Amino acid sequence: MKFLAIALAATAASAAAVRRSDNVPNTSGDDASSTGNDAVIRYDVTEFEASCIAHSSQCSYSFKVKQHASMETNGVFCSALVTADAGNTLPAVTDGVCDDSSRTWSIVKSASDPANVNLSLFVSQPISPNSNTTGVHTIQYDELKTVSNPTNPNGNVQGYVGPEAFDLVESDN
């Protein structure tokens, strides 16, 4: 009986410690803390690259992602080679995968202003058969650059010029 009481107390203390570490404030100046909201950081992204390929109809996305505030030391590699949207712009991705991981990812394009389309990167990982942990980061239109190359038969190509590392905050999606 004493053992059971000690085990339950240890479990409760461990759960409280995990809950506190999930809500560590972001001091990096990124989305979660700079907006003044209480967003919970779920994932850390590094080495993010996205660009359409000159002389091709393809675009490439690649990055590493790891769970925030965890014992995970190296992120898993995620990538996709996809067909460009009209105008050789970065497309949406619905079924991105990560190497040797259950994590999946997607890119969603905003539709509010066709001239200034933002992209949102979502990363998700199952935590039980019925639920996932999902994080999101919005890539602002000004972090996307269209380059004109007169020797490119496809015309302009779009690429990402924002920071290579950023946080993904908790998402309901």
Image (spheres, rainbow, N blue to C red):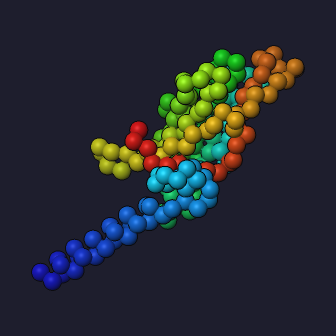
- Residue occupying the far bottom of the picture: 2
Residue at x-position 24% and y-position 76%: 9
5 shown above or below 17: below
145 shown above or below 129: above
The answer to whether residue 54 is left or right of residue 93 is right
- Residue occupying the far front of the picture: 36
Q: What is the x, y in percent for residue 115?
A: 65, 22
User: Can you say which quadrant of the picture contains the C terminus?
Assistant: top left
Residue at x-position 55% and y-position 55%: 33
The image quadrant that residue 3 belongs to is bottom left
- Residue occupying the far left of the picture: 1
The image quadrant that residue 89 belongs to is top right
The answer to whether residue 173 is left or right of residue 44 is left
Q: Foreground residue, 58 or 160?
A: 160
Q: Foreground residue, 112 or 156?
A: 112
Residue at x-position 77% and y-position 22%: 156
The image quadrant that residue 73 belongs to is bottom right
The answer to whether residue 44 is seen in the rendering is no
The answer to whether residue 153 is seen in the rendering is yes
The answer to whether residue 18 is left or right of residue 9 is right
- How many discs mark residues in the rendered view? 0
Q: What is the x, y in percent for residue 154?
A: 77, 17
- Residue occupying the far right of the picture: 151
User: Can you say which quadrant of the picture contains the N terminus?
Assistant: bottom left
Residue at x-position 55% and y-position 24%: 112
Q: Foreground residue, 18 or 113?
A: 113
Q: What is the x, y in percent for residue 108?
A: 53, 31
